[in-house]
Image (cartoon, helix red, strand yellow):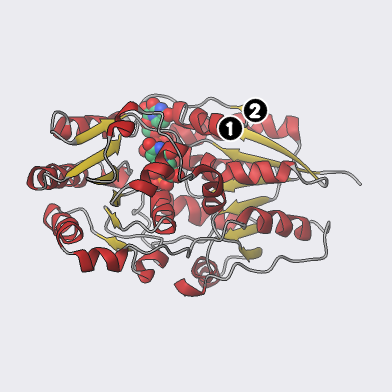
Amino acid sequence: MSKLKIMSVFGTRPEAIKMAPLVKHLATLPEVESICCLTGQHREMLDSVMDIFNLRGDYDLNIMQTRQTLSSITSRTILGMDEVIEQAQPDLILVHGDTSTTFAGALAAFYHKIPVGHVEAGLRTWDKYSPFPEEMNRTLVGDIASLHFCPTRNNLRNLDQEGVRGDKFITGNTVIDAMKTTVRPDYRFQTGELNELDFSNRRVIALTCHRRENYGEAMRNIMEAVRELVETHPEIDVVYPVHLSPVVRECAFGILSGIPRVHLIDPIDVEEMHNLMARCYFVMTDSGGLQEEAPALGKPVLVLRRETERPEAVRAGTVKLAGVEKARILELANELLNDPAAYEAMAHAVNPYGDGNACDRIARAILWHFGKSEDRPEDFGSSDCE
Ligand code: UD1
Ligand code: UDP
């Protein structure tokens, strides 16, 4: 029997972290030939993930440019993928999430009439400009894809509500699979600054901030809130691995550099990041991935955005939407620092996003869809987030 040729396409840090365990799992299946096409939308941050998971791309479009525009990412990916698809002739193309790589990868597959599987399908805010451009990217991929791998029941309902067609599965999020290999109690940090932090006696806050819709005033508000928080709390340290986007770096370093106890460091690899979260006091972030990871580690999260497409952990009580106004961010952060009961109410481990078996469910769903197995996988039961 001929093997099913599955090409996974990804290019940014979060896609790589969440696709790596799936790519590795697919490679173990006798029915499958698993290959990877990297767009290189992120260069350094993608390579760091590939190194940690010991993976290599079979194709690399290497599209990244400094201060790249959405149009350049999209057009360079589509053009690059034309050639790759002609050469590789995959039976299925997998894309992940909501980046420009995701959208352009799916569109290129569609132009070649190759079926698309969408991993992390069905997340929605219902606001096309927030997150921008991610909400529209994932909505458009929903129409293109034939297989939809929804992390939670709530995500599946979103697709049903839109009338999206195709085979839909509730699988859990693959990032929880990835965390099985990255989080270790005896982990030793490679980054000097992280080794010097006293996690036992001081309160360490892990911060990330990079979203396009936060560029400008919102990001300045966030940085100013962090500056005031540190200045008013001598017991805290803030660790901020600053994204490589020049827009983000100008804002972060402009407002926070030189402030004592704010540690502005370069992006850290995913093992460092997951273990930093496991040891910190709480997390402040506008990242999507961190909103899924921190709850699994029992860490409170303040989301530095106006909305979230991940309401499950908000409902579970571990995540609060802090918005992008300085006063409200400070109010919620102060509450976590000053009120032990408020802290305890948020600091419990919940796993609405997965049980660590998402890759296995996705693989079994693919085999079932292509008639290589008779067993449709059971849905991941995400009862605590319904
Ligand atoms: C992209 C995704 C966003 C995701 C984020 C994860 C889009 C439109 N946005 O946003 O959904 O949340 O990745 O981090 O797809 N850069 C480097 N080296 C790197 C990575 C980035 O120098 O390894 C710099 C480049 O100058 C690049 C800029 O960062 O032009 C912005 O990168 P880009 O991928 O366009 O946007 P992100 O904000 O990273
Ligand atoms: N991450 C990392 N190093 C960092 C910051 C984040 O490895 O310095 C990881 C984080 O743990 C999560 C992913 O990158 O798995 C999230 O990526 P990002 O916040 O860039 O994108 P988003 O999830 O918002 O799309």
Disc 2 crowd rating (10 Å Cα; few below 14, some 14-19, many 20+) is some
Residue drawn at x 13%, y 52% is 326
Residue holding disc 1: 38
Q: Type of residue at label 2?
A: Tyr
Q: Type of residue at label 1?
A: Leu
**Residue 353 position in % (x across, y down):** 49, 61
Residue drawn at x 57%, y 71% is 381
Left-right relation of 14 to 308: right
Numbered disc 2: secondary structure: strand
Left-right relation of 245 to 254: right
**Residue 262 falls in image quadrant:** top left
User: Is residue 69 visible to us here?
Assistant: no
Residue drawn at x 13%, y 33% is 259
Residue holding disc 2: 59
Report whether the residue tagged 1 is closer than 8 Å to ligand 1. Answer: no
**Residue 370 position in % (x across, y down):** 79, 56
Earlier-in-chain disc, 2 versus 1: 1
**Residue 240 position in % (x across, y down):** 28, 38
Instruction: Examine the rendered structure and indicate whether residue 72 appears above or below residue 362.
Output: above
Tell me, for residue 89, which label it has, or none: none
Name the quarter showing ligand 1: top left
